[in-house]
Image (spheres, rainbow, N blue to C red):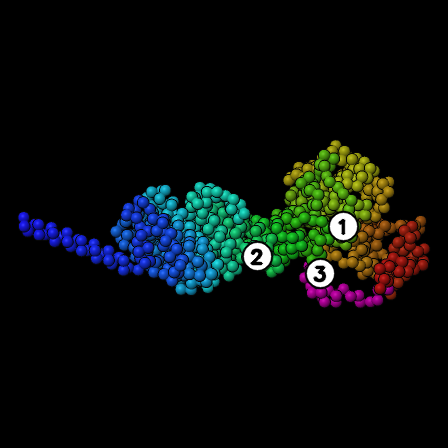
Amino acid sequence: MRKIAHRTCFFVSRTIYMACCCGCCSALRPRYKRLVDNIFPASPQDGLVKSNMEKLTFYSLSSPEKLDRIGEYLFQKASRDIYRRRHGFVIIAMEAMDQLLVACHSQTLNLFVESFLKMVQKLLESTDPQLQILATQSFVRFANIEEDTPSYHRRYDFFVSKFSAMCHSNHNDKPTRENIRLAGIQGLQGVIRKTVSDDLVENIWEAQHMDKIVPSLLYNMQTAEKYETVSCMETDTRDGLDDDPPRLAEACLRELVGRASFGHIRSVLRPVLTHFDRHELWVPTEFAVHTFKIIMFSIQAQYSYSVVEALLQHLDAGVGTRVRAARAAVLSSIVAFAAGDSVGPSVLEIINNLLTNLRASVARDSEKESDEKLYQEALINALGEFADHLPDFQKIDIMMFIVSKIPNQRGKGTKADSMLQSILLKSLLKVGSTYRTTELSKAFPAAFLDALLRLSGAGEAATRALLQRILHTLLDRRGNAAALAAPTVDYAKLGLIVEKCSRPDLIFISKHGYAIFSSLYDGLQLESNTAENVCAIYTTLALLCVELASEETVCDMLQLILSMQQSALSNPVLSTAQACRVHGAALALLALVPHVLLLPALQEYVAQIIEARREEAPHLLPPLLEDYDLSPSKMPNKLPYLMIDQMALAECLKACGVEARLQPAAPYAGAALAQRHSWVEAGAAQGRDSLADISAGPNAELDSANSSPGVQRHCGGGESVSLEALRRAASGPSEAERREAERRRATLNDTFRTAPFDHLLLITQPKYEIKEKLEEIFNSLSEEPLLGVGVGGSPAGKPTPCTKYFPELFLY
């Protein structure tokens, strides 16, 4: 008992001694430590002691040099509590840190931040989700504080890595998992705000950081149940961002892209493209389209074309055709955003890249042709979407640029060239469909029109039909193309919109009409024509008739109709079905002329022809068929009384008060596409023979109606026509003569298309003085004048001065 009493007394005395020592020592401890100790309650459930916290705050503001020591001491206490799992006191310490951070002036903030970030890092390193979330919230508060002077030695590598890892949390409990991911996204947003605005601090745009931040945001965005892409202004009005990881990640990505300068755009786009490749997110395209639209909505407008360029360069990045098609589809969905802010070289650069990819697609041997076609269609759609948002003058430049890339092949070429020609024409059609024609001269610059007309002789029938569709798009200003898609003779029910032709359009057609009509006429003479080709050319001519409705143009249109009919009767290349289609298209065009110009006499004459054909030859009326089963008696050349008569047309025009300038034969037969403004062209258009043929003598082919169809012979009382000439006129040229004429025509056309200009000048220069040669010709024809007195010629026996019939030669 005595020993026990002694030990008890010893323990009590020791306790009292230690208490006294602690009391004495606490009075000697620094004041900032005593103030920090006093903010902690006896029980963590009581929370922070507010009165003592106010004292600590006042002391820190009064003695800012103590801030670093206060922060370090709070960090030490929190570290011990974390180790002992006393999380209540850790939360109190973090709350005290937050209040001190807010109370600090910006000049003294750097003294406290290091301890604060060490505390946040310590909490993030713990495995308790509650502490990780708490640390993230504190870091976000710190990120929203603006500092006057940056801290160059401060680094955020750990925070980027940790917050990115939290974005990929796979915690078993779904609410906890979503809270951790939300905290990770908020932390990344805080890092971005803290570092991206100041170039002197750590460069957040480096690859090591972007490769963690961007995939973390995309990983959370792709978990959304529904992708809703809205503009940046609409984003600010949406609620619920703080409790939905996909939407918060989207907002963070918008902020990141919006803060990126031109030099940093690629730093963001590279990990985006890599993430989609690694995780095979291109197919299906919904998420990819959603992501890139967010980027285009958020990026600074003047940099938007760089996103398109990056995606263009990534189109062929070593994957299958299906993925390429998906990338192209994404491109077509965003390319319009870049059009409005692209100027100068960037426009043609994007167009050239699209065309380059199209050519590469054609040249590529794909195992899955369907996927390759999807890829090509997506690129063409991208081209159209880009052009749709450009001004009209740039659309014309783009169309001319595309035309310059189209291989100009006539006849049969390689399969690759034919495919490339077709695809580029589809691209041209896509761009043309976005253009709004005001004046034909602006829609068809001379170089552009010539290029289109050269392509009208393409070897593939489908390619030629595609070219006509391009002309329809550019010619149709009043929405009549759909109604005129197929030949018809009943226009009253179509509801066509017809307006008076403007003066600039009349000037345009007077300058280029011969070349246009010649090209369309030649297009009807091809052996490979289908019903679709004839319908397409009919639509083009019908649109020209409607758009250029005027008394000045009616004779040209009627002359072309007569030429079409003559070619259907005499062209040996055309089959019976093709000839019937041309007859049907010619009558449909003839029926359209009085409808748009209100010519009653002509309308009555057309009605008579239609009625007669309905009774005896319905195969010569629309609609156009693929095949015609005709008896020999029903062949078109056996029904001359059902044909359109030139003299009757002239009388109808005179009855309506329109000057008739019609020729009895086809002035477009064998005409070259290149328009030459001289008397030679006019003579060729009227079917006159060359000077060489005329100089051969008065008996050389002058009596043949086929060799000189445009000259009307007026035989006097004592004049006679040879029997041989009449026989030739009745039978027409032989098969050999026709083939030779076709060969000469093809050679002439090819020479004028391919020969150098200097060579053309050399071969077309006359070898004699034109005036002297003409005087010689007229002297030789004095006994049988070329133009009779009834046409204004000189009396027989007197030479006709050439200045009277060829005034153009003497204007210079």
Residue holding disc 2? 302
Question: How far across and down, in percent of the image, does residue 539 sit?
Answer: 69, 44
* Most distant residue in the top direction: 615
Residue range in magenta is 748-771
- The first of marks 2 and 3 along the sequence is 2
Q: Residue at x 24, y 58 (%)?
A: 24
Question: How far across and down, in percent of the image, does residue 263 sit?
Answer: 51, 61
Question: How far across and down, in percent of the image, does residue 516 sit?
Answer: 72, 51
The amino acid sitting under disc 1 is Asp
Judge left or right: residue 510 versus residue 70.
Answer: right
Q: Tell me the CA gap for discs 1 and 2.
A: 39 Å
Query: Can residue 132 be seen by looking at this rendering?
Result: no
Judge left or right: residue 304 versus residue 568.
Answer: left
Label count reads 3
Residue holding disc 1? 505
Q: Residue at x 46, y 57 (%)?
A: 146
The answer to whether marks 3 and 1 mark residues whose Cβ atoms lie closer than 8 Å is no
The amino acid sitting under disc 3 is Phe
Secondary-structure class at tag 3: helix
Q: Tell me the CA gap for discs 2 and 3.
A: 47 Å
